[in-house]
Amino acid sequence: MKPEVEIYDTTLRDGSQGEGVNFSVMDKLRIAERLDSFGVHFIEGGWPGSNPKDIEFFAEARRRKFKNARLAAFGSTRRKGVAVEQDEQVRLLLDADTPVVTIYGKTWLLHVKEVLRTTPDENLAMISDTVRFLKAQDKFVVYDAEHGFDGYKDDPEYALATYEAAEKAGADIVVLCDTNGGCLPNDIREVTRAAAARLKCRIGIHTHDDIGLGVANALIALEVGASHVQGTVNGYGERTGNCNLTSVIPNIALKLRKTSIPERSLVLLKDISQFVDEIANIRHNPRQPWVGAAAFSHKGGTHVNAVQKIAQSYEHIDPSSVGNTRRVLVSDLAGRSNIVLKAQELGFKINNETPELRAILNRIKELEHQGYEFEAAEGSLALLIRKILKHQDPPFLVDAYHVSMRRDGAGSVCEATIKVRVGSEGAHTVAEGDGPVNALDSALRTALARFYPELQKVQLTDYKVRILDTATGTAAKTRVLIESTDGHEEWGTVGASENIIEASLQALMDSMEYRLMKRAKAHA
C-alpha cells in the first residue's frame, strides 16, 4: 500500500552541509543501510558532480541492495546556453546509476536575473529540458523548486510557471523549498495550496529551520496538499539546520494519523537518532523532542506525583512508542514521588511507606545545596540511596592521596599517589597522566584493581567542570560530572568542592563504587 506521506531523507547531502558534520564514504554507506532498514522511502546520497567522495559513494552503493528505499542522486538543471545532452553535471547524475534523480531549479526571478544572469524563458527551458531528458533515461525525477516560497511571494505567476514546467516535462514530484528557512506557517499554507490547485503530480515540502519552524512548516504543508517530506535525521543541515525527521515522522504517525514509515519502525526512532549522532561524532542533544533523554523527564514534585498516578497527565504519548523512556529527575525540587520512582527505576525496592524515604530526600536536598547535582549523576544517586537503605560500609576507602605537576624538559608531567584500603588490606600506587585528573584516575584504578580486577575495564568517557560561585574567583566551589563506561553500560557520577582535584576524586570514587555495586547486584 502506498503511504500517505513519503519520507525523503537528505542527511547524507543536505545534512552533511551542517557545521561540524563530516561523513566518510563508509559512514554514508552505514547510515544509508540503517535508513533503508528503518523504512524511509528515498535516500539522497549526495551530489556526484560536486566532489569525488560522492562519486565514490554511488560506486559503492551500486553493489548494495536496498530493500525499502530508493537511492537518489542530487544535482541541478542544465546550465544556461548548454544543451542538456552536453552538460557535464547532468552526465554525472546519470553515471551515478541511481533509480531516482533529484534536481533543483530556480523559482525566484531575483536568482534567475541576478545569480544565473539569464532570462525567465531560458530558466523555464532549463527546468523542462533537464526533467524531460532524465525521464527519457527512465529515471524517477524529483524536482526541487529552490526558493519556491520566496519566488512565489515575489511573482506568484512565474513561480507557478516553474512548477508547471517541471510537471509538464514529466517530473514525478515537485518539491516546494523554503531554502532560506524564513517563512511563517501562513506563507507555507498559501503557496502549497496554490501549487496543489495548479499541479496534478505529487507535491513535496523541503523546509529549513532558520527561524525554528522547519518542522511546523512541513506539517502545515502536509495539511494543505503536500504528501512528500524532505528532511534530515536530527535536523542536521546548513546554518541552523533542516526539517528534523525525528520530529516530523512521529508527528505524522501519532498526531496527524497518516501512514508513512512502517509502523514497526517507530519504536526504533530514538535508536536511529543516536546512531547518526554517533557516526557523525556529535553528542546527542538531550532536549530533542521525541527522542532526547529529557523528552519524557519529570523533575517537579507535583508533576512526578501526577505521573505516578496516571502517566498521560504530563506525557503527550507513551515514550516507548518512539523507543524512548520516562525519566524521573532528582533535585532540590524533588518530592517523595520523585524519590520513589527514581529509586524503583534504579532497581531498589522502595515505596511511599519506606521509613528511610525522608532521610534520602533530606540528604539529596542537603547535598544539592552544597553544589552537587544528581540529574546527570545517577551512579552517585544510586550509591546514596543504597547507603541509607542498607547501612553498608563502602567497598573501599581512600586514606590519602597526593597530586603534583612538574616541568620536565619540553613538556609537563602530572603524577598522582594514592593509598586505598579494602577491609584490613591496603594498596599504595603511583601513576602518571596527561593531567592531574587522568593521573589520579590511573592511580586509583591501579590500586583498586589488586582487589577488584574488573575495574580495569572502567573508562572515563566525559569530564565536565562547572564553576558554581564565580564571584569568589579562584576559590570558587566547583562541581565535577564524570561519565564512565565498562563497555556495556554508561553511568554518571558527581563531586563538589572548592578544590577541583577533591571534587574529581569524589566523582572517580563514586564511579568505581557504582561499578562494584552493579557487580554485587548481578551476583545476588
Image (cartoon, rainbow, N blue to C red):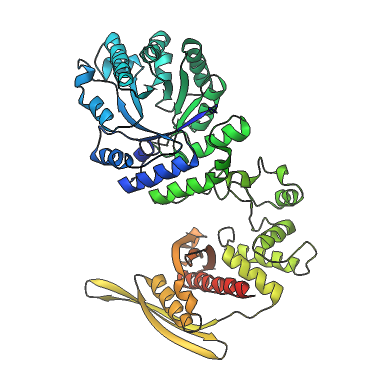
Image vertical order of residue 49 relative to residue 353, above or below: above
Q: Quadrant of the C terminus?
A: bottom right
Q: Residue 16 placed where, x, y %?
A: 35, 40
Residue sitting at x 44%, y 87%:
428
Looking at the rendered image, the quarter that the N terminus falls into is: top right
- Left or right, residue 380 beside residue 340: left
Residue positioned 59% across, 62% down in the render: 378
Whether 334 is drawn above or below 428: the answer is above
Image x and y of residue 520, in percent: 60, 75
Q: Which residue lies furthest to the right in this view?
A: 353
26 or 521: which is nearer to us? 26
At 50% across and 89% down in the image, what residue appears?
A: 426
Q: Quadrant of residue 429?
A: bottom left
- Residue 160, compared with residue 325, is above or below; it is above
Tell me: 97 left or right of 419: left
Q: In which quarter of the image is residue 402?
A: bottom left
